[in-house]
Amino acid sequence: MLNVAIVGAGPYGLSIAAHFRRHDIPYRIFGRPMDSWLAHMPKGMMLKSDGFASNIYDPDREFTLRQFCADRGIKYADTGVPVNLDTFAAYGLAFMQRMAPEVEDRMVEGLDFAPGGFRLRLERGEILRVRQIVLAVGITHFSYVPEALSALGPEFVSHSFDHHEISRFRGQGVVVVGGGASALDLAGLLRDSDAEVQLVARKSSLKFHTGPPKQRSLWKRVRHPQSGLGPGLRSCFFADAPAAFYYIPQALRLHLVRTTLGPSGGWFIRDKVMGRLPLWLGQTIQDAKVKNGKVSLRLHAVDGVEHDISTEHVIAATGYRVDMERLRFLSPEIRARMKSVNGSPVLSPSFESSVPGLFFAGVAAANSFGPVMRFAFGAGFAARTITRAMLNRRAAAPLPAHLADEDAARDDQALEEQSVRS
Ligand SMILES: Cc1cc2nc3c(=O)[nH]c(=O)nc-3n(C[C@H](O)[C@H](O)[C@H](O)COP(=O)(O)OP(=O)(O)OC[C@H]3O[C@@H](n4cnc5c(N)ncnc54)[C@H](O)[C@@H]3O)c2cc1C
């Protein structure tokens, strides 16, 4: 029986794999390497996180983004030089080759209980018995489309997650819905690609980060210290103390996750958006219909005025909502057994869910460990904590499962035969 399977090969899965490897914890890792970054963010995008906060973590901090950029002659600074999407994706692949080369580019299609652990079904038929699972599936399954748009067919509405190559919209009408970084990036880049883009947002004004100041006074540095989630004491706490965040009472934790780091664009995107495209701010979409091959949107403004706008395609850049029910590869039994609050799993201090042996890292862990889990910056903490849990467990139960559990060994053999047959 396999000791641990990591499901997901983004910044979290790769960081965890690098830590397991270093500590000789036997594992396999599955998923499309850096998939969210290579295929689900718009080409030309720049990261909102600073260079120093855009790392993938090996235990010795040997292969940082800074190191990668130095090796390749790419311009880098801890702050003030935005990181290109292409650079970060290439860094992720280089990190994988160096620190976690065993990534198997296969999706997990099913996960169910089995004696002594779990039964995992992979794309192309292989079935494995695994004692523990770390799910680091990121944003893959959680894209959210508002109800008003969800009845439009896929040729008329898509989610920002569906887009990487956006040049196909050249000359076409596109309405981007949303007021956060995804929406602003996409709108600016679509405009660059000569799409006829409009932006619709509920907020009555758009927010952008302020650019990096040339020099910060001592007072500013004390009052607003720099952190992996931006400047300020609160951000410092969220970025650097996820273990303490865990012990905040649940209702307050959920409130903080919901309200911290609200929608805003990077400072570098302001000039790509402001003055370059029609902005429908303070508007909610009341109705969406297809008329004569075009989408017609009825907008309702805060002051009660209504407008109709029409376009060829709508992109909902309306974010992601964690919901365990959307992890369809988890068996109904696992989903039913798992305790969750507002769709997110309830986790132990070591990221383990109420299903023993099933761990969650990344955005699914945000309600437990705070907003840092929505960003690559949280991957180091997650990797260290989960690795420690695995090592403690190994120390407490040194007998390999197949010696401890003869039934499990028999089951393994049956599964191997089944995998060979399929
Ligand atoms: C537009 C946009 C901009 C962003 N900008 C930033 C930024 O500047 N800085 C930042 O830190 N964060 C940013 N984020 C957040 C970013 O998504 C997370 O930081 C990051 O992706 C978290 O990494 P992860 O490993 O948890 O998940 P992901 O990178 O989403 O990786 C998920 C992995 O899980 C795999 N997977 C999913 N389902 C399965 C399955 N069934 N079987 C096997 N594998 C599976 C995928 O193939 C993939 O390998 C941005 C997000 C968006 C949408």
Image (cartoon, helix red, strand yellow):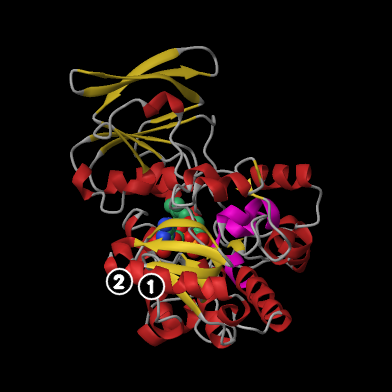
**Residue at 72% across / 42% down in the picture?**
255
- Kindly identify the amino acid type of the residue bearing the numbered disc 1: Glu
Q: Residues within 10 Å of mark 2 (few under 14, many from 20)?
A: few
* Tag shown at residue 420: 2
- Kindly identify the amino acid type of the residue bearing the numbered disc 2: Val
- Horizontal and vertical percent position of residue 26: 52, 82
* Tag shown at residue 332: none
- Horizontal and vertical percent position of residue 338: 63, 49
Ligand 1 within 8 A of label 2's CB? no
In the depicted view, which residue is nearer to us: 354 or 289? 354
Which SS type dominates the magenta stretch? helix
Judged left or right of residue 382, residue 35 is left
Judged left or right of residue 385, residue 412 is left
Ligand 1 within 8 A of label 1's CB? no
| Circle 1/circle 2 CB separation < 8 Å | yes
Question: In terms of image quadrants, where is residue 223?
Answer: bottom right
Query: Range of the magenta residues?
Result: 363-380
Residue 368 is a magenta residue: yes
Q: Residues within 10 Å of mark 1 (few under 14, many from 20)?
A: some
**Residue at 77% across / 46% down in the picture?**
250
Residue 335 is a magenta residue: no
Task: Identify the secondary structure beneath mark 2.
Answer: helix
- Horizontal and vertical percent position of residue 294: 22, 23
189 versus 246 height, above or below: above
172 versus 379 height, above or below: above
**Viewport quadrant of the C terminus:** bottom left
How many numbered badges does the structure rendering display? Answer: 2
Pointer 1: what residue? Answer: 416
